Image (cartoon, rainbow, N blue to C red):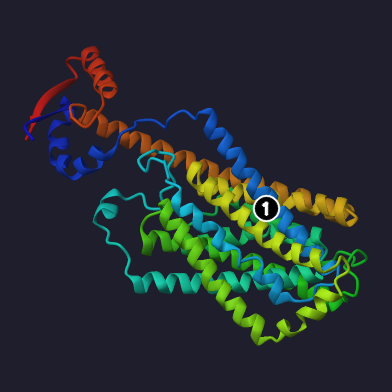
Amino acid sequence: MGDELALVPRDQGAKEENSYHSTSTITNNQSTLTPKPKNFRWWIRVALYSFFVLSGQSVATLLGRLYYNKGGNSKWLATLVQLVGFPILLFLYFIPSHKDPNDPNYPHIQTNPEAQSHSQSPSLKSLALVYLSLGTIVALNCYLYSIGLMYLPVSTYSLISSSQLAFNAIFSFFLNAQKFTPYITNSLVLLTISSALLVFHSNSEDPKGVSRGKYALGFACTIGASAGYGLLLSLNQLCFRRVIRKETFRAVLDMLVYQSLVSSVIVMVGFFASGEWEHLRAEMDGYELGKVRYVMNLVGTAIAWQVFMIGAVGLIFDVSSLFSNSISAVGLPIVPILAVVFFGERMDGVKVISMILAVWGFVSYVYQHYLEDAELKAQRKSVGLKHKIMHFHNPKLNFTFKKRYQEILNSNPNEYDLRPRN
């Protein structure tokens, strides 16, 4: 395609000559030096997705508690409605993703360009193993959450669920080389104390007919589910880095859909194997709000969880996976407040202290990841600047970049030289 000129500092000429061919593939694909400014439509989308996450999670949790309060007893059915609505996500396959994968804000899992360029697509066997394994964990987590919600007040349940951030940090330390910084350590301590306070909390506000033993079972299952969710997040990150090797819109959507499919099948098997399906007619007839509202409750719960998933996926690709998880965690303290309004639960001193500690731990956790994310973006922009200077005469670059770096050359004529590239 003819000779190509590169703008190179004189004192780095020999060094850049050796590294030219190893970086040309990367630089030819980059089209922006800095993140594009966020426009009004971007803010509207982020606000809408955040609303989906917060409202979907809160409504689904409250409807789950209402199901048990008014006569529902099937733990497997309560688990199934968390998952079975996943076909709603299929329409997302027809929505193109406009996120530029070369934008420094793009949420890449893998940051080694050389490894990324030489990586091969994972085999069907590897993907099947990933989906089956993670789908099984999802099914177990949802079942444990259903038991916890059945035996605990919804406010207590939500506060204990916030410990998932602490478990995520612990598992990331072992699986993804997450460092225990002061902020992460502070978050672990605060979230642990927040959950520990509720162990010794009086059961005067427990749901009707729940003994101290069932309260302990619900507490243990919620802690176990939170640990499982933290493990799931870490394993997802590990699988994207080691097996899938990319985090595109399609790859993440495939992960969500196939995980939900596997977990739905597992829960469906458990539902029929347990024999709970035989009592559905009697449960519907005995539901305090009537048959129609019984069905509406279950359908509404299924839809609410999928609204949550749509919002979470949207935030991942308009902002980042960190922001998506952070907004999800923000919803955990919201539910106890709504429980006071809709279920008349009492927010006593112990719960208030537990909530404050949980929010404090959450903020500490998110701030640490914000620092890491900002550092990563700075590194990507630095690499992008270096490559743009080397290749400003590349015909694929637009006029704006050529003009900008021509100005750099003119302002420092003795510092750079122009050399032909074959």
Report the side of 319 relative to 274 (left or right). left
Report the side of 377 relative to 188 (left or right): left
Q: Is residue 212 visible?
A: yes
Q: For the point 16% across and 39% down, which residue is it?
A: 20
Residue at figure coordinates x 58%, y 55% from the top left:
309
Q: Which residue is drawn at 25% across and 42% down?
A: 26
Q: In this view, does 335 lie to the left or right of 233?
A: right
291 or 62: nearer the eye? 291
Give amino acid for label 1: Gly
What residue is shown at x 15% (from left), y 43% (from top)?
A: 21
Q: Name the image quarter holding residue 240.
A: bottom left
Quarter of the figure with the C terminus: top left
Foreground pick, 219 / 327: 327
Q: Where is residue 247 in the image (x, y as percent from the top left)?
A: 41, 53
Q: Residue 244, position in %: x, y?
A: 37, 61
Residue 43 quadrant: top right
Q: Mark 1 points at which residue?
A: 56
